[in-house]
Amino acid sequence: MGTSFLADARGRTVRYLRLSVTDRCNLRCLYCRSDARAHDIPHDNILRYEELLRLVRLSVARGVEKVRLTGGEPFARRGCMAFLGMIRAEFPHIDLRVTTNGTLLRGEEATLARMGVNAVNLSLDTFDAARFARITGRDMLAEVLGVLEGLVTAGLRVKINAVAMRGVNEDDLPEFLRLARDMPVDVRFIEFMPMGSETCWSPDFFWPASDILRRANRLAALTPAERMREEGGPARMFSIAGGRGRFGVISPLSNHFCATCNRLRVTPDGRLRTCLYADREYGLRGLLRHPRLGDAAVARVMELACQDKPLGAELLRARRGNAVAAKGMSRIGG
Ligand code: SAM
């Protein structure tokens, strides 16, 4: 093992696996659950933790160095914390991360730190309680801010993800800059992506990274930050004069990063997705559960699928209507 890599003809090698552990979420963010009418995936079709662990094993043996748990809300699934512990115990050296809305994490921040989780991505789109409730469907801003404090106090590296929505959270920009100045966190505005067949995405909502940066530069002295050694990600980050944290943008629409994409996604029901924007998925669950085929067949599918990894930007350009992919983020794993 360890000799075959997950690579394609464009010279891209997969190093990063994003596992969506559930499609369930306790929030209903307007940019995410656009296919809210779709039913939850039946429990039997959700990959069991031991099946997910097999996927981690197969991936690490093929060069994957970084694993992220996401969802849905990962901590809405029972046993998620223990699962993180299982991954860490078996793979002490991988870069292990989690993306969460934070609402179910109160009191668990130190546990994540003890487990050696390398970074936590925390979703936070606004500092206004009423607006938070409008965006997410729940009045839980105070919980998220409490968890943010707890994560930082526990010594964890924290990245804030804010989906940039014109006319929705534009006037939160000064507060986000203040956060990046006052706390040792990375604040990133992500361009709103047109995901999901009934997405509420529209050009009116779209707030491009270039405009965010132009405005941010008027509010703070930003200088391009040096990339940290482990950073290969798509964010463009800036330091703020006198600040403890950093501010940046992720621009999947206006300035894509397909050429260097090194990720694979697995949906909660065990479908391998080689590109966020591509609806082509490769079913792994049947193979994982097959009495004879098992890991060798799963690995073969992973290798072949990766050879065919598309360029999402081409799919984005060719899309008809608003949505680039039929599924919303909660069913894919953001
Ligand atoms: N529930 C967790 C959370 O809120 O972080 C994890 C899943 S959520 C789908 C992961 C990330 O996807 C969030 O940071 C969210 O902001 C982002 N996201 C979801 N839909 C998006 C969209 N249409 N455009 C851009 N980002 C999106």
Image (cartoon, grey):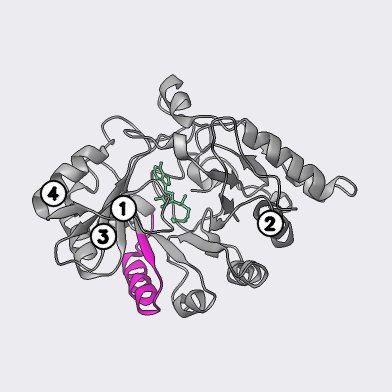
Q: Of helix, strand and loop, which one carries label 2? A: helix
Give whichever of discs 4 and 2 has the lower sequence position.
2
Q: Which residue is mark 3?
A: 246
Does 71 sit left or right of 28 as displayed? right
Residue situated in front as seen by the camera: 93 or 167: 93
For marks 3 and 4, give the CA distance: 13 Å
Query: Could you give the CA–CA distance between mark 4 and mark 2, rounded to whole angstroms?
Result: 43 Å
Q: Tell me where residue 21 appears, x and y as whole percent.
A: 60, 56
Q: Dot 4 corresponds to which residue?
A: 217
Q: Is residue 59 above or below residue 141?
A: above
The residue type indicated by label 3 comes to Arg
Mark 2 CB within 8 Å of ligand 1: no
Of callouts 1 and 2, which one flags the residue occurring earlier in the amino acid sequence?
2
Q: Is residue 190 left or right of residue 217?
A: right
Q: Give how far apart the Cα atoms at labels 2 and 3 are.
A: 33 Å
Does any portion of residue 314 appear in the rendered image? yes
Q: How many marks?
A: 4
User: Element type at marker 3?
Assistant: strand
> Which of the marked residues, 1 or 4, is nearer the chain's N terminus?
1
Front residue of 111/234: it is 234
The residue furthest right is 292
Q: Amino acid at mark 4?
A: Asn
Assess whether residue 154 is covered by the magenta stretch.
Answer: yes
Q: Residue drawn 78% across and 49% down? A: 288
**Highlighted magenta segment, given as a residue range:** 137-159
SS for callout 4: helix
**Are the residues flagged by discs 3 and 4 in contact, CB closer than 8 Å?**
no
Q: Earlier in the sequence, mark 3 or mark 4?
A: 4
Q: Earlier in the sequence, mark 1 or mark 3?
A: 1
